[in-house]
Amino acid sequence: MKKLRYLFLAMLSMTFGMAVASEVTIDFNGMDLAVSTSNDGSGDINETWTYTQEGVTIAVSPKSESATNPNRFWGTNSGPQLRCYSGTITISANQNMSAIEFNATSNFSLSASTGTLNGKKWTGSATSVEFSVAKNTQINSIKVTLGAGQGGDDPNPVDDPTFDFTQNDYGMAHSVSGQESGNTYLPSGTTFSSGSVTGTITSKSGGTTTARLWETNTGVTDFRLYAGGKLTLSVPQGQVIKKVVFEGGDVSVLEGPDGAQLDNGTWEGSLNAPSFTCSKVQKINYIYVTYGNGEEQPVEPSYATISTFPYDIAFQSGKGDFVIEDVELDGLSYVWSVDASYGMKASAYYQQTNHTTESWLVSPIFDLSSASSNITLSFGHALNKFSDMQSAETQATVWVREVGGQWSMLNGVTYPETQSWNFITSENNQISLASYRGKKIQIAFKYESDANSAGTWEISDFHISSGAFVVTYQDMTMSEATAISIESGTTVPNINLQLNNALVVYSFQRESSSGVSHEGFFVREGDYAIEFYDTGLGLQPGQTITGSIKCKLAPYNNQPEVVKADDANDTNLSDVTLGRGTVAPYEMTADEAYESNTHLGDLVVVKNATIVVKENESNGETMYYVECPNTLLNGKNEDGSEYQYNATVRIQDYFGGFTFPTSFDGAYDVKAIYIATGKKARRLYVLSMTPSEGLPTAINTVEQEGNNAIYNLQGVRVEKAVKGVYIMNGKKVVVK
């Protein structure tokens, strides 16, 4: 419809003799200009340079005060070329401009004061446009289209994206795959603009946000918004954004200002500054924004209606039809978030500060008009870090309301006796909703906090059922459990873990930093292993297990781990046969320990290991590592030169009671439990370290020394040892 309107206006213009589109090309290559071919300053622009041609004027400012390189005309084989590194390029005309095209090299980084700059083409409707220069921009010519333009309520075109992250970084830092800048996140408060539209990125109470501009090895760039990040789009006062379309990855899980998920990445409304959040990473290539004159229309929460039961949701995969309604955030961006292992999590403790907040997690509308009289609500939850249990029960509450009515607290919720990360399961937390049969209701989880108490509330699952609550289990092998743990780290609520002559290789009891006692054991079957944590089964090393155990897969930092099932009574040994076996550690190399996906949670021994000792610069802690002799990583010195160094795997006294030697001379056999501490990170929970036999390798952490001959690991003599591993006096030496 909009295109037809524009076509009609264009036809009227032609019919009644009004101005029609014409083009003016300003070609620097054909101009007679003083140019620079080196840093001689001949072509430098020290005062604003202006040029007018056929009613079009270009004005190029000098460099900004903080910039190093001057803006200038540079001599090329084709003639003069405009090169700008900072400052502005202003293009104006004696009539409306509808398009400006830059004939430029790949070095091009501009942003426009109005309209839309898509790649190297600007479109809009203006008599003057100021382009800000972000970095090296090389322009051969500029073509300006005059006379045709847009009008009406929508001053921006929507056929082209407002933000095209595949072509423009809008002045934001890149996070480049495979390089050190791959960990570059955009700070909270980062803004970027295209024409009249400004994007603002915020995170939980400032600091490093969960967003970055990601550049792949092929050069393709996308904007990535992670769970907890918020993107706000805004236009000047007096205007409203009417429609936003996101294109990229699974943008359907983006949530709009009303808390509801977007339909195919599209939001429509009437707000000056709508905000968008997500529960998992979003890869955004393009954003299309339609805006114009109008008044803001308040956003009311949008609730789905559920009339078919049972209704079940596992919050580890997202909040589903639930809506978050924030009342007070005390400077935070959010309180509720999705945790892939534990479900919906509420916390107002951030940067060592208790914040005063109130935030509600509100269910969809449940239409109970045809539900049975035995309608039941059940959910699993855990509470910890509140000032005391009384505060927990008053700051983590459950509410109910009839549609159109007021909220009232729901009685009958089961709370744990003490605070911990152990869940009250759904089966052990059932509340009758029989009194609401025939009505439409909503359930809400209300989280509150203050300066004295800002605990954590985790809600794993939620059920509305018409009948007895039944736990179902899915069969899973140890290799399948390992694959899920490594690839996604997702919790699988109830499984039948299938075991065939699996061997218990190690058991432990330890006390957490909060004084809570925990127990567990590690079980090996073939090339795979798994940790049983706080299951109460009490098995000991040397016992074998054949059969199935009902439990919950709950990976911790991608480490395969199981805990009690939702119905804790189901986690028992009734379906297994126990026997006896011999415990021997699995022998692995240090290089294998660096990145293996097998034997995670197994008893292992790394033989003939070279020990590296480092000091944590932030807290002075002495840290111990096994060196990987055949795994080399790339690094950079402070002067920008590159070097290679050996990868390492950290050794940690997790179980307590182990004392590291005060010095290391020669190689060692390290016996440990091999653990995942991330998708790619590995660690050795040390049990013993004994000197190896017959290997002269020695590594000591030393300060850099001169005089003696120094060789790299390829046997080439070097003059100076920078950070890395070298051969000195016949020994390997790590230079810090």
Image: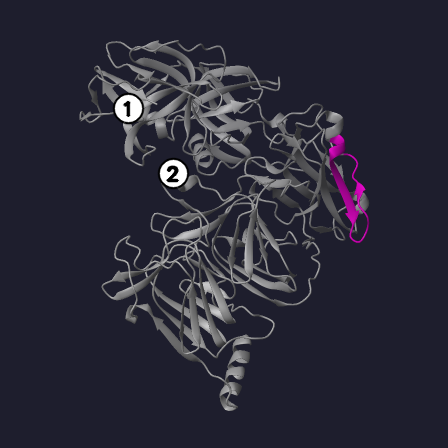
Q: Is residue 455 left or right of residue 89?
A: right
Q: Quadrant of the N terminus?
A: bottom right
In the rendered image, which residue does mark 2 sit on?
A: 180
Where in the figure is residue 235, as x and y percent of width and height? 59, 60
In the rendered image, which residue does mark 1 sit on?
A: 725
Q: Is residue 550 visible?
A: yes
Where in the figure is residue 120, as x and y percent of width and height? 40, 64
Which residue lies at the image location 58% right of the left edge and 44% below the top edge?
A: 318
| Rendered image quadrant of residue 272 | bottom right
| Rendered image quadrant of residue 361 | top right
Q: Is residue 409 magenta?
A: yes
Q: Is residue 34 left or right of residue 128?
A: left
Where in the figure is residue 687, as x and y percent of width and height? 43, 13
Which sits in the foreground, 569 or 335?
335
**Amino acid type shown at disc 1:** Val
**Amino acid type shown at disc 2:** Glu
Which residue lies at the image location 24% right of the left edge and 66% below the top edge?
A: 78
Which sits in the foreground, 250 or 484?
250
> In the picture shown, does residue 220 fall above or below 478?
below
Dot label at residue 663:
none
Which sits in the foreground, 412 or 146?
146
Q: Is residue 23 magenta?
A: no
Which residue lies at the image location 35% right of the left edge and 9% below the top edge?
A: 690
Q: Is residue 158 left or right of residue 432?
A: left
Task: Give the CA separation, mark 1 to mark 2.
Answer: 20 Å
Furthest residue to the left?
Answer: 716
Furthest residue to the bottom?
Answer: 16
> In the picture shown, does residue 343 fall above or below 295?
above
Residue bounds of the magenta highlight: 393-412
| Rendered image quadrant of residue 583 | top left
